[in-house]
Image (cartoon, helix red, strand yellow):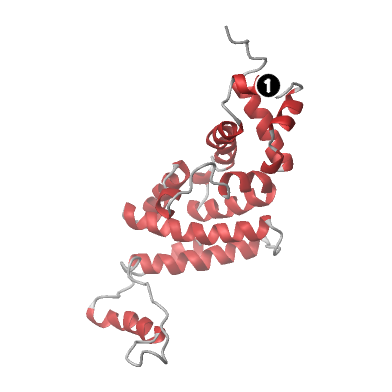
Amino acid sequence: MPPRPKFTKEEVLAAALKIVRERGESALTARNLGAELGSSTRPLFTLFSGMDQIKQELAMGPATELFLDSCKNIRDYTPAFKKFGMMLVEFAENEPHLFEFLFTSPHGKTQSLQEWTHDRLGDQAVDIICSEYGLDRETARTLFREVWLHCFALCILRVKNVVHLSEQEVSESLSRSFVGLLSIAKAGLMDKLAISPVLQKTDANAQNPSEQAADLVAGSMDGHFVPAPIPPVALQQQ
């Protein structure tokens, strides 16, 4: 008969969360976890197969719940999606170790860009975009993914102390990115803007990027690029 565990899974994960929040993922070792629980390392592995399982369950459970709890009142704000981005940057600043653990560690699986935004957080954000801006889900998902990449860049700069970002600077940067992408989305061009760099000296017939961009804009003459107007209230809110 296997020995009775000295503590529950929940207690182990709570101790693991404490270590990650205070010292980072690199400090989450069996020895440190045992010390946090006042035990040797052996009892840990009557509940878990190893440290990889502990990290995976921590990421999927208590760590994610803590982050989602920080966003639970998101719909109380207008615009809610803008607040989403600002709260992520704020979370990265207030919980740098936990941000890195949740969002920069693959936990055993590297995802595609599409998979990365298909989770509870992504689904909630897409719901908000559809509701606030009248986009279909596919377009809203693409818009969310592009804005999220920009938002994560701000988070990494903040977490790594590369630059100091004031709340106002974060707000303005997110607004510029979002309003530009929303204009593209309203024009139906989210999947049509891949302008490839070319070596002009080796391909005399190649169209240079500025000409490609000009052609996209000129398409407004024949209906290919007709940006739908963004309501003034949306611009004011962003």
Task: State the quadrant of the N terminus.
Answer: top right
Instruction: Report the front residue among 235 and 98.
Output: 98
158 shown above or below 116: below
In this rendering, position of residue 238 left or right of residue 230: right
Secondary structure of the residue carrying tag 1 is helix
Quarter location, residue 171: bottom right
Residue lying farthest to the left in this orientation: 222
- Camera sees residue 98: yes
Name the residue at 45% across, 41% down. Answer: 120
| Residue neighbourhood size for the residue with mark 1, other residues' Cα within 10 Å, grouped as few (<14), some (14–19), many (≥20) | few
Q: Position of residue 237 (x, y in %)?
A: 50, 60
Name the residue at 65% across, 23% down. Answer: 44
- Camera sees residue 231: no
Q: Position of residue 41 (x, y in %)?
A: 70, 24
Quarter location, residue 144: bottom left
Instruction: Report the front residue among 199 and 94.
Output: 199
Instruction: Report the front residue among 29 and 124.
Output: 29
Instruction: Report the front residue among 1 and 81.
Output: 1
Q: Position of residue 224 (x, y in %)?
A: 26, 75
Give the labeled residue for mark 1: 42
Name the residue at 45% across, 62% down. Answer: 234
In this rendering, position of residue 114 left or right of residue 80: left
In this rendering, position of residue 79 left or right of residue 219: right
Q: Amino acid at mark 1?
A: Arg
197 shown above or below 89: below
143 shown above or below 10: below
Q: Position of residue 48 (x, y in %)?
A: 58, 25
